Structures are given as structure tokens and as C-alpha cells.
Amino acid sequence: MLKVYNTLTRQKEPFIPLEDGIVKLYVCGMTTYSDAHIGHARTYVAFDIIRRYLEYKGYQVFYVQNITDIDNKIIKAANEAGMDPLEYSANYAKRCLEDMNRLGIKPANMYPKASEHINDMIKMIETLVKKGFAYVSNGDVYFSVEKFKDYGRLSNQKLDEIKAGARIEVGDKKKKPEDFALWKEAKPGEPKWKSPWSYGRPGWHIECSVMSSKYLGVPFDIHGGGADLIFPHHENEIAQAEACYGKRFVNYWLHSGMLKVRGEKMSKSIGNVISLREAMEKWGSETLRFFFASYHYRSPADFSEEALKNAENALKRLRIVKENLEELAEDGELSESELDEMEKSYFKTIGSIKKDFEQAMDDDFNTPKAIESLFEFAKETNKILMKKKPNGKLCKYALNEFKKMANVLTLLQEEKSIEEEAIKKIGEKYGLRGQAESIIEKLIEIRKKARKEKNYKLADSIRDELKKAGIELEDIGEDTKWRII
């Protein structure tokens, strides 16, 4: 039976979803004011593996990951760039999702944006004010922490300790330092929406309570994110949602460990923030995924040249085994009666290794232990291949089982890459030069203009040409995302 470590109870618990065969999963997404970095990758690879193992066990997973597209950092960066904040964040949201796709992470079922759920947030805030959990203060609305009796249980803090550490910043209109903003009156030049209290925008924490409950219901099964979000973000999510709905918000809280770079916390001030694009360019997406999987998702991970080199070398051993099995594999129904004693022993060993793999993953997704099973599989396969050419159907069976286990850990996927020459040829047709990614972005702009001018023939032609070159376009409102097919 699968057991998961629940941050809320600080212990491993049997995982029992609310609905048979269905798991509802929400993971806090990125605040899109810059490109994704390797810290983001660490979190989303961890939850991709969790999602893949749940699917491996036969669950249907409905996965929602939000996009914070309005925030102080976005407003500041957009102002510096001389752009509208929503347009600015939409550009980076698209880039971040493209990077996750290239990394080999399965897309979530939904990526709701904060800016598209303002009315839902206003409704929740109104309910909290009506129930006495929130108060209005000169155009702002704050959640009164002392009114929620269980506040602090996720982060294992007492309210007195939280009060002692809280501060009121300049411009805050709250009554007590520990209270947090649900709605903020807009300052000059900031994006704003009409509300019963002021023209303003929501606080950060309210968006996840609203979007998760809207699409997954209350309660839902798993809420995830980085360990840095436990307090105050996830603590505040629980307070808002449970105060609003009067019942449990989430059954299992899962948190991924932090990522260090060469032993130091990743920080702009230190100058050791590594973008995901830069890391993929240097190491390749599968090497990065192997590196992340080699750490238990709750443990801190340390990113270094040496660790990446070790990951690269380890992957080569697994790829060689896969390639050797592919060369010998034959289609057809495998019958144990046609196997000799050595082949029967290998067949049974595969079953034993598979059980070890599942036991490791059932123990709170213990990926380092699960990786050991892959290398045990490689060792046993090499043993038999050194002695004989095994039955081709047995090799096909072994290959499929090997790939199934590896795929749970995001490994041995068919790697996606841009067909550079094909894209450049399309670009030349439209007078475009440069790198493939830049050409794709420019073609999207040409197509967007064509659609506005109702030149659908040109717009469809660009879409079809890109599809032939392995790039699929997806129109979401006025925005267009692209991904490698």
C-alpha cells in the first residue's frame, strides 16, 4: 500500500483518495516575472514523478497547477520593461511552460491564471467578511488570524510565536501584525479591478484557495509545493479555505525539499541562480531529471558539476541496457514454456525487481531506492546477455517492464528536440533569420496579426507548416502557446 508523508500530521499515512480510482492534485505554480530556474524544475520534476507513479498504480490523476500572473514582482519588472503587467507575465508564463515541456514534464490538466479568477476571489473574501474571519480597513481587506483557532498547525507553530515574529510594514492597514491581506487597494500605476471595498487586486494567498477549490472541490486529495511555501502561503490557504467552507480543505500536504547550488542557497544576491534553459542547454533535460530523481523529493538537493556528471554517466548505463534489449526484442506472445532455465530465472528476477521498485515507491515515493532497482535490472540483464542471446519475446517483455519503471522516474523517454533546419526553412519563407525558438515566436506574431486581419489562410498555413516541422500551436484566448510534438 502506498504511504505518503503528510506535512499536516508530520507522519507517513496510507494514501486513500476521496474517490475510488481518482486522485485530485493541486501544486502551486510559478509567479511569472522571469524565466524558470532549476529550483522550479526540482519541484515540478518531483510532482511529475508523484503523478506518474499514481498513474502507474492505475489512478486517474486530475492535476491543476496555477499561474500567478499578477504580483508585486511582476508589476515591478513590467514597469522596468515599460510593459503592461499582464502582457509581461503572459510572455513569461508561455516561456516557463515551454521550458517545462522541453524538460520532459507531463503537462497539468489545467493552468488557471490568477487574473482570470478575480471575481471568484472577491466572492470568497465577501464570505470571509460576512462570517467574521476578515475585516475591511480603508480599501484593504485582511484575514484575522486569531479568529481561526487552528492557525499554525501545518507549519507546527503556535500563534504566540507567529505574533512575536510578525511585523506591520509601512502602508499596511491591518489591525494586528500577524493578519494577512486578502485584498489590496491599488497604488497609482498598478493593475486594478473593481470590488466592494476598492479598486485593487487580491493578495497572493487567496488565489490558490480559490482556484484549487473551484476545480477540485473541497476537500481534495493532495496539495503540493516547495517546502518554502509551508509558511505563510499554505498555512494561509488552509485558514482562508476552511474558514470559508467550514470543513477540511485538503487531505494530504506534500512538500518538496529545497535546492542548493554547490552547497549554498540559491539566491540572486549571491549570483548563483541558474535558469532552466541554461541548465538544459549545458546538461540536457534527461540528465537533469535523473539528478532530481536521485534525491528523495522531501530531501534537500545540491546542484553541482560533479553531481550532474555522475548523473550523466549513470544514465549512459541505463541507456545501453535499453538499446541492447531493443536490438533483440521480438513481437509476439511470451510463453514461459518456451524459455530455458536461465531465461526462466531472468523472467522471475524481473518480477522480483519490479516488486522492489514498487515497494520503494510505495514508501513515500522513495526514488533513490527505486533507482537502485533500475540498476539491479541493468545488472541482471547484462548477466544474461553476456552468456547468450535470450528469447526475443522475453527481451521485448524485459524492455517494456524496464521502460515502465524508468518512465515513472521520468527516465528513458523519447527526447523531444526542435527540428532546427525545418524551422529555419519556414523562417526563410517569411524573411526571418535567427535561432529556431526566435523564429517560432516571430511566426506566432505574424500569425496573430493575420488572424486579427481575418487572413485565416495565412494563419492556418503557418500553423500547418509548423506542425509538419514538429511544433504544435495552441490558442488560448488571445495568447498562443507552442510545444514540441
Image (cartoon, rainbow, N blue to C red):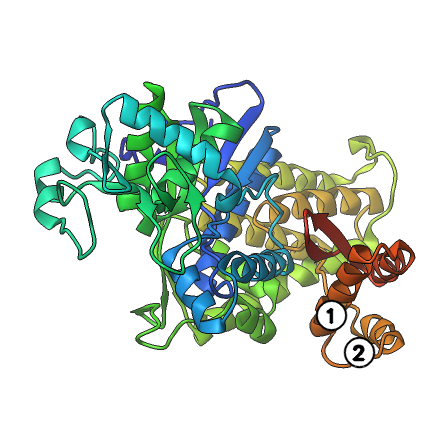
Which x, y percent locates residue 18? 48, 20
Which x, y percent locates residue 399? 73, 48
Residue 108 visible here: yes
Which x, y percent locates residue 134? 25, 31
What is the crowding at mark 2: few (fewer than 14 residues within 10 Å), some, or many (at least 20)? Answer: some
Asked if the residue at tag 2 contacts the one at tag 1, i.e. Cβ–Cβ closer than 8 Å, the answer is yes
User: The residue tagged with tag 2: helix, strand or loop?
Assistant: loop
Q: Is residue 438 above or below residue 240?
A: below
Tell me the number on the disc at residue 442. 1
Q: Nearer the viewer, residue 15 or 180?
A: 180
In the image, taking residue 336 as reference, residue 44 lies left or right, namely left
- The image quadrant that residue 236 belongs to is top left
User: The residue tagged with tag 1: helix, strand or loop?
Assistant: helix
In the image, taking residue 49 as reference, residue 425 lies left or right, namely right
Image point (80%, 78%), residue name: 432
Q: Nearer the viewer, residue 207 or 142?
A: 142
Which residue is identified by label 2? 432
- The image quadrant that residue 319 belongs to is bottom right
- The image quadrant that residue 249 belongs to is top left
Image point (76%, 54%), residue name: 473
Image point (19%, 38%), residue name: 156
What is the crowding at mark 1: few (fewer than 14 residues within 10 Å), some, or many (at least 20)? Answer: some
The kind of residue tagged 2 is Leu
